[in-house]
């Protein structure tokens, strides 16, 4: 079996129509070097039990995805499968055969990524507003990195124009500079560092949906990429309006930027 690395787990990751990532258990089974489904399903069952023991519903993280499969004689049989969240994959790795080198890699990968990228709904609601801001800002930072890669592959060279296209769609024509001026920010101060959690979530949705659209439609020109980003931003704005939500430009700007909060946090740590 070829040497595996973190990219192997990313290679089998899927994104559904809502932009939510998931893994198929049958594909994960092969990457984790389990030859028999029966043995791998035993690991899944242990992981589901561990999930329930943590007062987290296993049904939310291990979603049944059974499918019909044709045998050589054309007979159809039901093949068991699951759609797994990143947290489910983490639990499977924790309950896998630790003697396997790939299991150790999986434990490290999914443990780090789960804590960085996914919190349970219960954990998230317990965060303060500033903690939610830090969490969402981290996701937008990672999202923008992935979006830039997709944009580059689509032929984008002027990234300021590309990102402004998305902002214009979401903010009713406002560019990044316009948003900064409205928020009263200093020159080159990061606008994302000066957003509340709800505004960051709207932008994260814009970022993730644009990346997926560029890839799905195989966009090949800068003009089309900019148009795609604008349209995604505009579509999200229309959804907010339809649901009676607050427009992003009408959401309050926090009193302190995340950079300020970070400095204060570091100062307190030094003094203690």
Image (cartoon, rainbow, N blue to C red):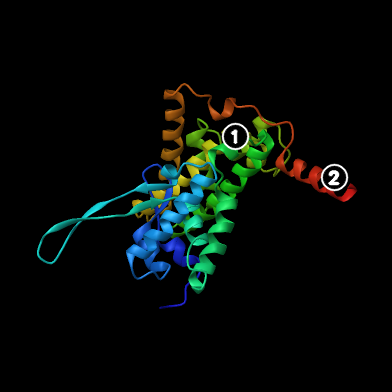
Circle number at residue 202: none
Residue at horizontal 57 percent and vertical 63 percent from the top: 108
Q: Nearer the viewer, residue 127 or 63?
A: 63
Whether tag 2 and tag 1 are in contact, CB under 8 A, the answer is no
Displayed quadrant of residue 256 = top right
Q: From mark 2 to mark 1, how far is it between C-alphas? A: 25 Å
**Rendered location of residue 119, percent (x, y):** 56, 44
Residue at horizontal 53 percent and vertical 68 percent from the top: 105
Vertical side of 161 occupied by 79: above or below: below
Circle 1 sits in a helix, a strand or a loop, which is it?
Answer: helix
Circle number at residue 268: 2
> For the residue carrying disc 1, how many other residues have a C-alpha within 10 Å: few (<14), some (14-19), or many (20+)?
few
Vertical side of 249 occupied by 69: above or below: below
Residue 186 visible in the picture = yes
Vertical side of 253 occupied by 109: above or below: below
User: Between tags 2 and 1, which lies in front?
Assistant: 1
Q: Nearer the viewer, residue 83 or 206?
A: 83
Residue 226 visible in the picture = no
Displayed quadrant of residue 228 = top left
Q: Nearer the viewer, residue 104 or 144?
A: 104
**Rendered location of residue 151, percent (x, y):** 46, 54
Q: Closer to the N terminus: mark 2 or mark 1? A: 1
Circle number at residue 125: 1
Residue extending farthest to the top is: 244
């Amino acid at each position: 079996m070829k040497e595996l690395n973190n990219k192997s787990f990313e290679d089998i990751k899927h994104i559904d129509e809502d932009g939510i990532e998931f893994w198929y258990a049958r594909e994960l089974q092969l990457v984790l070097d389990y030859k028999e489904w029966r043995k791998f399903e035993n690991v899944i069952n242990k992981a589901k039990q561990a999930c329930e023991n943590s007062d987290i519903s296993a049904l939310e993280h291990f979603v049944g995805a059974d499918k019909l499969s044709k045998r050589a004689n054309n007979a159809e049989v039901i093949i068991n499968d699951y759609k797994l969240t990143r947290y489910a994959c983490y639990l499977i790795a924790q309950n896998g055969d630790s003697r396997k080198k790939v299991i150790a890699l999986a434990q490290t990968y999914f443990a780090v990524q789960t804590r960085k990228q996914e919190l349970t709904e219960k954990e998230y609601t317990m965060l303060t507003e500033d903690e939610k801001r830090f969490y969402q800002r981290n996701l937008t930072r990672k999202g923008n990195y992935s979006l830039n890669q997709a944009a580059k592959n689509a032929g984008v060279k002027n990234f300021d124009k590309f990102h402004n296209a998305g902002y214009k769609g979401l903010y009713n024509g406002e560019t990044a500079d316009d948003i900064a001026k409205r928020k009263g920010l200093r020159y080159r101060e990061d606008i994302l560092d000066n957003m509340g959690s709800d505004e960051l979530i709207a932008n994260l949705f814009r970022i993730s949906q644009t990346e997926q659209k560029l890839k799905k439609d195989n966009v090949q020109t800068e003009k089309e990429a900019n148009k795609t980003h604008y349209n995604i931003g505009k579509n999200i704005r229309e959804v907010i309006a339809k649901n009676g939500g607050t427009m992003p430009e009408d959401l309050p700007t926090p009193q302190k930027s995340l950079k300020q909060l970070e400095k204060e946090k570091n100062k307190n740590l030094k003094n203690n």
